[in-house]
Amino acid sequence: MKTSLVSMTVLAAALSATTVSAETLRLLTWGGYAPAEVIEMFEAETGHTVEVTTSNNEEMIAKLRATNGGGFDLAQPSQDRIASAQEEFGIYKPIDMSKVEEAQIVPSMLSATATNTTFDGEVYGLPHIWGTSGLIVNKAEAEQVADYTDLCDASVAGKVSYRLKRPTLIGFAYAMGLDPFAAYGDTEAYQGILDKVEEKLVSCKANVKTYWDGGDEIKNLLRSGEVVAAMAWDTGGWQLNADNADITFVAPKSGALGWIDTFALPSRGRADEAAYAWINFVMRPDVASMITNAAGNFTAAVGGDEGVNADLKARYQASFDQAAIDNINWYPPVPAGLETLEGATLDRINAAK
């Protein structure tokens, strides 16, 4: 009886400790980033529970602004939407790197995100899901297209397409040997880059079948053969490759343009332990693969592609070897006023004969 009472006391203490340490993680994220099976595994392994609210960049900032950084314990804004929001609204708190299993994260992505989410000497973001824009090429028709400026080559005249949007300006700048992101802090230097790109894109207009607006539009143009090379997103290229082995995404020689959705801690979050536990859990290779299979995008987890659907993994690896990953030009925060300059440049390109 005495042994039984002791055992019950120990059990009660253990249950009490579990109850105290277990937290509810209020996660503000994108659709597909927290699959039900991943949540179930996390809850079973940690004792924490997860409540998911799906959102986008603009809504995330709006929700956190409305509560002065409260209401959520972990958010997933894109890396270029953190430092400026922190400077203006103070809605995040710094990452405690001592609680992060850094070895699980691809070093180049960890470094890029740290650089782009630093404010007042503190890092506010960690990389999670990433993707790129680059080239989608029908290799049977346009194998020679390996960089953005190759879309202006006479061999593909009338059969190329890209958007009249800022990624096109930036991609062409890099392919022309310029560094637009390095000029972000110098309006005059950035305008000089835009002027050179404008001249190139105006001279290239005769090559363009159409300036595409939506993902379905460009995929249909590539399927039909009306377009044989385009600037577009990686996932679109891989979707097309599933139906036509000749069409695939190509990481440009001058570097694909990369976005990263992050982990960021709202300033008034109250479940930091659960937040760091979730970060370390989903960056495990086995869990990262589950998320990629659900979302279609890859993660910044080391070895995170190992358990990915074989077909998607093969397409990804064909587009991105390690050198291509390390060559990605990651979007930094956009300084005030730059998008106005870009808009004026795009309007002139559109109006040019």
Image: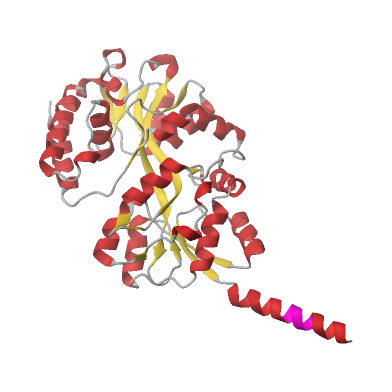
- Magenta: main secondary structure: helix
Q: Quadrant of residue 256?
A: top left
Q: Residue furthest right?
A: 1
Colouring scheme applied when the structure was drawn? secondary structure
In this rendering, the answer to whether 272 lies above or below 121 is below
Asked if one can make out residue 247 in the rendered structure from this viewpoint, the answer is yes
In this rendering, the answer to whether 157 lies above or below 260 is above
Q: Is residue 241 left or right of residue 56?
A: right
Q: Is residue 7 left or right of residue 240?
A: right
307 or 233, nearer to the observer: 307
235 or 8, nearer to the observer: 8
**Residue 287, percent across and down?**
59, 49
**Residue 332, percent across and down?**
29, 46
Q: Residue at 55% of width from left, 42% of height from top?
A: 304
**Residue 116, percent across and down?**
32, 49
Q: Residue furthest front?
A: 98
Look at the image and give the residue range highlighted in magenta. Answer: 8-12
Q: Quadrant of residue 230?
A: top left
**Residue 349, percent across and down?**
16, 32
Q: Quadrant of residue 107?
A: top left
Q: Residue furthest left?
A: 188
